Each structure stands twice: as structure tokens, then as C-alpha cells.
Image (tube, rainbow, N blue to C red):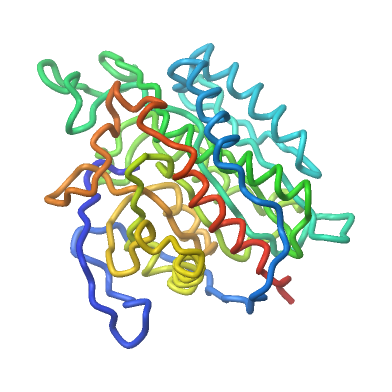
Amino acid sequence: MDTSVGAVSAVAPTGSPDGNAAPKSGSKTGDNSGTETVRSSSTKTVRPTFDGDRAYGLLTKQCDFGPRPLGTPAHEKLRVFLTAEMKKYADQTIEQKFDYRGMPVTNIIGVFYPAGASAPAKKPVLLLAHWDTRPVADGPFSSESRGSRFVYGAQGWNRTTPIIGANDGASGAAALLELARLFKQRKPDVGVLLLLDDGEDYGDFKSDQGRGEGVELGSRYFATHYMEDARFGYPDFGILLDMIGAKNLVLPKEQYSQNHAPGTNSKVFGIAEELGYKKIFLYGETQDVGDDHIALNEAGIPTIDLIHPLPNGSSSLGYRYWHTLQDTADKCSGASLKVVGETVAEVIYRETPAP
């Protein structure tokens, strides 16, 4: 995610609980050709329970491979593991492959049919998280950032200090795999795509006037190629899970999400409040983060980003271990994963099929 943003600010609602504010100065914007349609949802669900301890076990399993940036043996071993896990649950598992600077990049996509269906949905819900980790510990609280600078060029980084990425990488992927188990156990009424996207955290977020070079690779590829495969349908809306495992988890509304998918934001945060999680899902706070949801919104898929604040600006809420060697499994908890997983599961199981 973009290192140039991440400040958190309180906002007052304007006209509705959304507080659908205009874009802040300096925040990323994009041309969103899609129109958000918020479907009516059932208020009663019978569904499996998201197991936070099992999700935490999946988080630690990923960390056991070591740092997992593009082009490393650990990255390839994790790809094999994640693909095998997805195949246990999804009706179809697809690897969307491409290269970046000679390194393989792989999106792992699980296709889940709606309840009673024998084919993919035409308008599924998209859930996504990145599974790669950053090759440099360049966060604002990283001791590795002191001294010689990290410089990204034609040959890659001038030096590497790869991170474990327990929260930034493993947490979102762990939650998606646990959700996959739920969707296998009891199919929702809607189709679901689970996208484990690759190459989010590799390159330089600040280059190209803030759009970045070598970052958000998997989400950008999916956004420009998903229509080439009929199995993906035309996603109705999306929810990105990024850095959702910290012990001190908080999730303010993300401003770009609020600008482009306010209805989805309200639905998710409203259900979280119903479930008793309003101290974590901060309804009256916003943050600006450049992340994998940007490309999807630009492609017409209204997508929100659930992400712990970055340690920038004056806010004390930021995850200070972001892009440091200390982003390890002991900073995360199954309880936090359960809060997010239960909320997202409830959203999905309440959804009714798009016409």
C-alpha cells in the first residue's frame, strides 16, 4: 500500500450515516466507470462460524516459510501451499500468471458457485487480499531505514531487508482461506470470488507521481484481464482485507473506498456494529490509503479497503510494525482475525443474488 498516505481523521456525518465526504487534497482518485448497486440483504443468517484460531494457524504457517517477496524460493513454496489450500474448498481454482521483470507473479483465484448452482455466478462478490511480502524494511519505524537509503531502479532494490509480513501479507490471506472453508461447508446464496493477489508490495510506491512502479501488480492485472475469463463474471462489489490481524486492530473507513463504494462501506460497517464490533470498525473515522482496491474501482468494481491505519501522520492508531522486521506473528491474534472474518462472512451470507 502507498507509503505517502495513511493519516486518520475524524469526520462528521453529512446527510447520512455515511458522511460521504469529498476526496481529500492529496488523496488518490480515479475514473470509476462502475455504478455501485447495494443489493437488499436478509437479516437472518444460518452460517458456519469463522474460526479465529484456525485463521491464526494459517497466518503462522505462511510466516514459517520466511519472507515471501517475488522471485524467492519461499514465495514459490507459498504459492504451492496457497493453491493447494484453495483447491480444498473452491469449486474451481485458477492461477492467473504473468511476469514482472522476469519474476513470476501469480494470482490465485477461488471460484465459489452460489447455493444450488452448478456454474459460476454472473455477478459474484469479490473478496481479496495480497499474499506476497515486502523485500525491504522501509517503514517509518524501521531501524533498517536509518543510514543508507533504499533506492529502487531498473535492477530492483539497491539492497534488501525482507520482512516476515505477518500482518502485512499473511493476515488477509489467512482470513480468505478460513472464509473458503466456510463457503465450502455451507454455500452462500451468492457466488464468491476469492482473489489472493500477488505482487502488491514489491516495488516503489512513490514513483510515477504516486501511482507506483512494481506495486499492486496482481490487482492491476486482474482489473484489466478479468473480463477475459467468463468464470469470473462481473463482480458486483469487492472487499479488500489488508493488515487485519494486529492485536490492537482498528479499522477506520478508508476515504477512497468511501468516495467510490459508500454503500458497501455502510453495509460492512453497519453489520460490524450489529455484531458488537464498533470499537474496531470506526464508523466516524477516515484514512487515505493507496492499495489494491484502487485498480478495481477504476475498472468499475466498487471495492472497499479494510485496513489498519499506517503509522504516518499524527494519529496514534497506526500499526508501527508496518514494513519493519518486527511485523511478526506475535503482533497478531486470532481474536482480531475472527472479528473481521465474522463480519465479512455475515455480509456474504446476507447477500441476495443480483438480478
Answer with the quarter of the image where residue 90 lies: top right
Identify whether 141 is placed above or below 31. Answer: above
In the rendered structure, the answer to whether residue 184 lies left or right of residue 130 reads right
- Between 232 and 308, the one lying in front of the other is 308
In the rendered structure, the answer to whether residue 325 lies left or right of residue 235 reads left
In the rendered structure, the answer to whether residue 34 lies left or right of residue 348 reads left
Q: How many marks?
A: 0
Determine the residue positioned at 24% across, 45% down: 318
Percent x, y of residue 344: 56, 57
- Between 176 and 222, the one lying in front of the other is 176
Percent x, y of residue 349: 68, 63
Determine the residue positioned at 46% across, 15% down: 66
Note whether residue 53 is visible: yes
Answer with the quarter of the image where residue 204 lies: top left
Give the quadrant of the C terminus.
bottom right
Note whether residue 261 is visible: no
Identify whether 295 is placed above or below 266. Answer: above
Percent x, y of residue 115: 82, 60
Answer with the quarter of the image where residue 245 lies: top left
Determine the residue positioned at 32% across, 40% down: 212
Percent x, y of residue 258: 38, 68
Determine the residue positioned at 51% across, 43% down: 129
Give the quadrant of the N terminus.
top left
